[in-house]
Image (cartoon, helix red, strand yellow):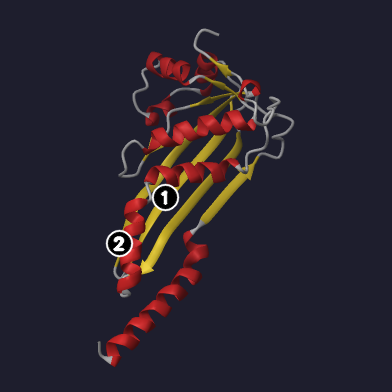
Amino acid sequence: MSIWVFFTLIFCSIFSISYDVSGEDLANKEFWTLHPDFNSNKPKVIAVLPMDNFSLEPALEKTMYREIYERLTAKGYTKISAQKVNSVMKKLGVQTPGQIAGISLERLKKELNCDALLMGQIEQSGAMHSGIYDSVVVSCSLRLTSCSNGETLWRTEQWRTAHRQWQLDPINAFINFTEHENDSREKRVAWLVQEMFKTLPEGPVNVEFGNLLEKAKEISADE
């Protein structure tokens, strides 16, 4: 290896590290808002509506839905069962999440018999290639809407860019590719849901930590 190639690799490695550090704040974004009267109008029963998936990664909305269901239970909210929600969606002729917007809030409240609706979507999930760098991007958002007045009680967005490395550095490029292949999109979505739910206040149902029998109740289709 010539001395010129050696110093070129060293320079690229240093440049790659500096880019990762300087670009971290721009790549990782978090946003959330909470209604000022949330605690006085805290919903007890929440229906989780089908998730939208605008990414090119199929079935990620199912992972998001499952993670949200588990987090709601742990947070102390009573939830409408997924079976009941699916039954109502079928009754209303909803085949895709986008069609929910055409149904009035009053109708959804009546059919689902809940205090609030939780809607979410995956905006993006996949690899981004631009010139000499590569990254994996996952972004999600959630919105909790009151059934009584249609106001947004809680809204949150998470955007993460992972494993960004300059491709001029052959060592980092190889590590980057390996990490991309081994780290599943499902794990990233599950992690983002976990981060988003940190900003949701505790629900009105008393949940005893470690006791599954005391967790928030699920309202089934026959209730």
Pick out the residue farthest to the bottom. 3
Residue located beneath label 1 in the image: 138
The residue tagged with tag 1: helix, strand or loop? strand
Residue 54 visible in the current orientation = yes
Pick out the residue farthest to the right. 40
Pick out the residue farthest to the left. 1
The residue tagged with tag 2: helix, strand or loop? strand
Name the image quarter holding residue 64: top left
Q: Is residue 194 above or below residue 73?
A: below
Give me the disc on residue 95: none
Name the spot of residue 202 as percent of width and height, x first.
Answer: 68, 34
**Could you tell me which residue is drawn at 62 percent across and 23 percent down?**
216
Quarter of the figure that contains the N terminus: bottom left
Name the spot of residue 200 as percent of width and height, x first.
Answer: 63, 39
Q: Is residue 32 above or below residue 178?
A: above
Residues 129 and 43: in front is 129
**Could you tell me which residue is drawn at 58 percent across and 40 percent down?**
197
**Could you tell me which residue is drawn at 44 percent across and 43 percent down?**
189
Residues 70 and 149: in front is 70
Residue 134 visible in the current orientation = no
Q: Amino acid at mark 1?
A: Val
Numbered marks: total: 2
Q: Amino acid at mark 2?
A: His
Name the spot of residue 116 as percent of width and height, x first.
Answer: 58, 26
Q: Are marks 2 and 1 in contact (CB under 8 Å)?
A: no
Q: CA distance from mark 2 to mark 1?
A: 14 Å
Q: Is residue 72 above or below residue 188?
A: above
In the rendered structure, the answer to whether residue 69 lies left or right of residue 170 reads: right
Name the image quarter holding residue 110: top right
Quarter of the figure that contains the C terminus: top right
Name the spot of residue 152 as percent of width and height, x first.
Answer: 59, 35
Residue located beneath label 2 in the image: 129
